[in-house]
């Protein structure tokens, strides 16, 4: 358990029927402490999902969440603030997820049950549907289970389940099967199987669990009718690909310099390898000015592609951000090519625009830019906007794309940004149809969702739903018209209520009214998208419709909030669960943030020193992270553990030499280090007084007064008198130990050690420990830098390991050059014992002995 709270059961139950997913997460915990403790329910759910219900049950008393109009909920929330209110319950938590988190104090020996329900429509990408589940229990759970039951009336053709955290030991815990219309996945690991890796028994599993599947497609479409609602799935196959005409509009302003531009070029080069010879393309670059590769779109012949690759390789940074100029040049170019007849008659045109910032040159008024783009495209082709990072107006990019039949996608500043860019291109790389319209009998259908689409891409699916005006209607016929590569195509699909009912006889897999809820989910999503692009009376009407449906079907959307009442200090307190909106999910950087210093680049070591301060070097960012660990003297911390090379480093804490009646808390330092290598059968026992070298059964003892170089096969030790010790275990594993000696007359402070990693490239990818886990590259984003409590130390929001943390700019000391005064290393300080940065919690790294 964690701090007395034992989560003894955690179950995730997923029911999927006709792509619509109904998910129930139930967590049961007991307070095994002798005093009241805080129980935390902390789960991550897909951004595309709507929360529909949440309930806490404490000692048999239920505390349900109530979904209200956001304004009314906010008023109730504000009235409770004066009584000591907690923060909102839902926050952004990474690329795909939002975090729902609620805490409540429960008495000793009491139990609490948390139940969260959310729903989403699974979208088809690259020929499969994906059910995404985040697994991060943060402790070992006696009864942990994920169960997914999938029912598809068309029949299931493929089903798989995998996890980013799945080890060979965990594979037997996954059970998956499918037959006919039913699929089943179960994941029920034992406590022993829940550890993150073989050699980290104190760290529970953490990662993504993903179920993918597809359905049989005997006909292009499938219509299902249930209880007065219908849904039409349309995904034709075995049709020829359309040639595409694509203009890439790329931001090359100064903010794109460095890794972002390099990753963009890598992605474009890979895209050029995949472009087909019957496609047409061009590039528009915008910085201070606008530059076009060619005056018009040209065919992707092998010769032209080689020239395009050379052009991409030579793209360079060019000043400010003339966003409007770049967009209008690309739009005009594609319009001219269409009007001149230089493009294939049957082809799909599109624009992909990538930017990382706001307009700073040329036209800078957002509304004017939106109007220019809308008037330029005039609905003729889709515009896809890719927003690189956070220092941009993502809401405007979304609105611009929505107004022009496209969508916006955030590209996260990370080591895989090039793969993200290429992945988006792959989604639109193979258009099969254009100008798709799905028609239904006018006199029997009402409240139809979107039924006209510019493009249909290979591996995707079009979904249309609606309400029948007469419940006695048993069948409808849909006509689908579209432009194909060779001809205009017409499809006819028929839906029959009796046939659907017969196909839905497997009641165990069905949750109530799912066709109606699917229609409601799709309608609310599309109303919110239209609302984003609308203004005036139209926006007000769309808002009213979306709000009415959100309340009726109990969806937490950007227009509603769920009010959660919880017992706290003998009174009920109120908290809110809101739906984060993409443009405010992560705060944008301020235009003129408080300045902070950057570490010197001459050298920077991942290390632990002082009482004890940890510094994590992040060379690819030319920056550092730092945190403190607060533990009692006498505890032993695992710093490095590599099962592949056999290298382990542990540090034992010692405290200040205070008198017994001194009530102040002890400072703790590394007072003893154990460095050992099981493959070489050697170990070092290091204290501020002596260094003992063990080689099998033999040992050699040195003091810090010695000046020694000791060489052993695969091992070198060098003592620099009264200063430091350097240990090398072959090429690529070198550590330095710095001796700190206090003034002899100082009766309080004690002698201690600092430990620095000089070279770690020999250590394997399985290395862990408080320091060892950071030998692999780690990436992070710093947002919303703002003044902190100390004027010289600004605070900021950090996104790291899919966590959102409040961090402080500060500095720690590096004593490798000067053991007395040290050198300041600026770093971002992570509070609370490094929680959110280190894997697990700091207590997971406490080990029983030095060796």
Image (cartoon, rainbow, N blue to C red):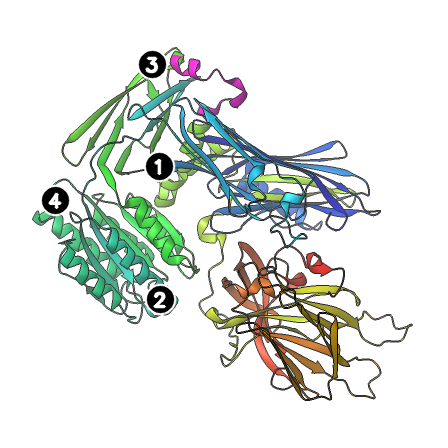
According to the picture, the residue beneath numbered tag 2 turns out to be 256
- Mark 1: few/some/many CA within 10 Å (<14, 14-19, 20+): some
According to the picture, the residue beneath numbered tag 1 turns out to be 127
| Residue 210 shows in the view | no
Which one is earlier in the sequence, the residue at label 2 or at label 3?
Answer: 2
Query: How far across and how far down the image is residue 261, in percent?
Result: 34, 65
According to the picture, the residue beneath numbered tag 4 turns out to be 344
Magenta stretch: helix, strand or loop mostly: helix
Secondary structure under badge 3?
A: strand
Which one is earlier in the sequence, the residue at label 3 or at label 4?
Answer: 4
- Nearer to us: label 4 or label 2: 4
Position above or below: 15 against 289: above
- Compute the Cα span from label 2 to label 3: 55 Å
- Mark 4: few/some/many CA within 10 Å (<14, 14-19, 20+): some
- Compute the Cα span from label 4 to label 2: 34 Å
Secondary structure under badge 2?
A: helix
Q: Is residue 553 left or right of residue 670?
A: left
Residue 389 among those drawn in magenta: no
Task: Using the image as rendered, state which of residue 368 and residue 192 is in the foreground.
Answer: 192
Q: Residue at x 61, y 66 (%)?
A: 771
- Mark 2: few/some/many CA within 10 Å (<14, 14-19, 20+): many
Question: From which residue to which does the magenta span run?
Answer: 499-516
């Amino acid at each position: 358990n964690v701090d007395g709270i034992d989560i003894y059961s955690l179950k995730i139950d997923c029911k999927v029927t006709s792509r619509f997913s109904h998910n129930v997460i139930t967590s049961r915990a007991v307070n095994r402490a002798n005093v009241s403790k805080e129980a935390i329910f902390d789960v991550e759910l897909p951004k595309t999902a709507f929360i529909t219900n949440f309930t806490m049950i404490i000692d048999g008393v239920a505390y349900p969440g109530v979904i209200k109009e956001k304004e009314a909920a906010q008023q109730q929330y504000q009235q409770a603030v004066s009584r000591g209110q907690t923060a909102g319950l839902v926050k952004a938590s990474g690329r795909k997820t939002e975090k729902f988190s609620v805490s409540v104090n429960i008495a000793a020996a009491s139990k609490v049950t948390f139940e969260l329900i959310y729903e989403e429509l699974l979208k088809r990408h690259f020929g499969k549907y994906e059910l995404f589940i985040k697994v991060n229990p943060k402790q070992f759970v006696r009864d942990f289970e994920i169960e997914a039951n999938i029912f598809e009336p068309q029949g299931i053709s493929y089903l798989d389940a995998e996890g980013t955290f799945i080890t060979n030991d965990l594979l037997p815990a996954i059970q998956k099967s499918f037959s006919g219309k039913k699929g089943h996945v179960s994941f029920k690991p034992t406590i022993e199987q829940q550890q993150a890796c073989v050699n980290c028994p104190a760290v529970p599993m953490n990662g993504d669990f993903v179920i993918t599947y597809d359905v049989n497609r005997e006909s292009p479409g499938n219509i299902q009718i249930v209880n007065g609602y219908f849904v039409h799935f349309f995904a034709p196959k075995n049709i020829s690909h359309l040639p595409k005409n694509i203009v890439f509009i790329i931001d090359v302003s100064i903010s794109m310099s460095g890794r972002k531009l390099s990753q963009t070029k890598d992605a474009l080069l890979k895209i050029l390898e995949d472009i087909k010879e019957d496609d047409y393309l061009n590039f528009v670059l915008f910085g201070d000015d606008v530059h076009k590769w060619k005056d018009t779109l040209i065919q992707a012949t092998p010769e032209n592609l080689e020239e395009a690759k050379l052009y991409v390789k030579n793209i360079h940074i060019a000043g400010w951000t003339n966003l409007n100029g770049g967009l209008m040049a690309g739009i005009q170019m594609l319009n001219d090519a269409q009007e001149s007849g230089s493009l294939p008659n049957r082809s799909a045109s599109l624009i992909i625009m990538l930017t990382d910032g706001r307009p700073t040159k040329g036209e800078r008024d957002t509304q004017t830019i939106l109007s220019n783009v809308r008037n330029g495209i005039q609905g003729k082709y889709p515009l896809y906007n890719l927003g690189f990072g956070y220092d941009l107006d993502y809401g405007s990019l979304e609105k611009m794309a929505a107004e022009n039949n496209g969508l916006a996608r955030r590209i996260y500043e990370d080591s895989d940004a090039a793969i993200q860019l290429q992945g988006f291109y792959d989604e639109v790389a193979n258009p099969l149809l254009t100008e798709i319209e799905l028609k239904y009998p006018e006199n029997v259908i009402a409240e139809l969702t979107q039924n006209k689409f510019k493009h249909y891409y290979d591996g995707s699916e079009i979904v249309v739903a609606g309400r029948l005006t007469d419940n006695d209607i048993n069948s409808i016929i849909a006509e689908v018209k579209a432009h194909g590569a060779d001809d205009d195509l017409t499809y006819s699909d028929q839906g029959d209520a009796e046939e659907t009912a017969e196909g839905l006889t497997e009641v165990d897999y069905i949750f109530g009214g799912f066709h109606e809820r699917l229609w409601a989910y799709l309608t609310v999503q599309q109303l919110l998208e239209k609302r984003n692009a609308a203004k005036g009376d139209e926006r007000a009407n769309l808002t009213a419709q979306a709000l009415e449906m959100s309340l009726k079907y109990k969806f937490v959307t950007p227009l509603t909030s769920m009010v959660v009442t919880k017992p706290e200090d003998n009174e009920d307190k109120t908290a809110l669960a809101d739906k984060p909106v993409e443009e405010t999910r992560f705060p944008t950087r301020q235009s003129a943030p408080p300045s902070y210093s950057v570490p010197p680049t001459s050298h920077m070591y991942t290390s632990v020193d002082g009482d004890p301060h940890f510094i994590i070097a992040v060379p690819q960012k030319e920056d550092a992270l730092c945190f403190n660990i607060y533990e009692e003297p006498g505890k032993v911390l695992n710093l490095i553990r590599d099962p592949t090379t056999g290298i382990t480093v542990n540090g034992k804490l010692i405290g200040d030499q205070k008198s017994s009646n001194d009530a102040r808390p002890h400072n703790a330092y590394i007072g003893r280090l154990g460095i050992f290598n099981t493959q070489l059968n050697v170990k070092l026992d290091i204290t501020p007084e002596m260094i003992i070298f063990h080689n099998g059964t033999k040992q050699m003892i040195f003091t810090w007064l010695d000046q020694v170089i000791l060489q052993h096969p695969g091992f070198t030790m060098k003592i620099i008198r009264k200063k430091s010790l350097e240990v090398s275990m072959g090429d690529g594993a070198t550590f330095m130990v710095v001796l700190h000696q206090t003034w002899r007359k100082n009766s309080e402070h004690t002698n201690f050690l600092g430990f620095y990693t000089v070279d770690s490239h020999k250590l394997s990818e399985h290395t862990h420990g408080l320091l060892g886990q950071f030998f692999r590259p780690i990436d992070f984003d710093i947002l919303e830098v703002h003044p902190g409590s100390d004027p010289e130390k600004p605070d900021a929001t950090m996104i790291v390991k899919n966590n959102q943390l409040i961090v402080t700019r500060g500095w720690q000391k590096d004593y490798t050059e000067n053991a007395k005064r040290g050198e300041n290393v600026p770093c971002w300080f992570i509070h609370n014992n490094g929680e959110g940065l280190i894997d697990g919690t700091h207590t997971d790294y406490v080990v029983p002995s030095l060796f």
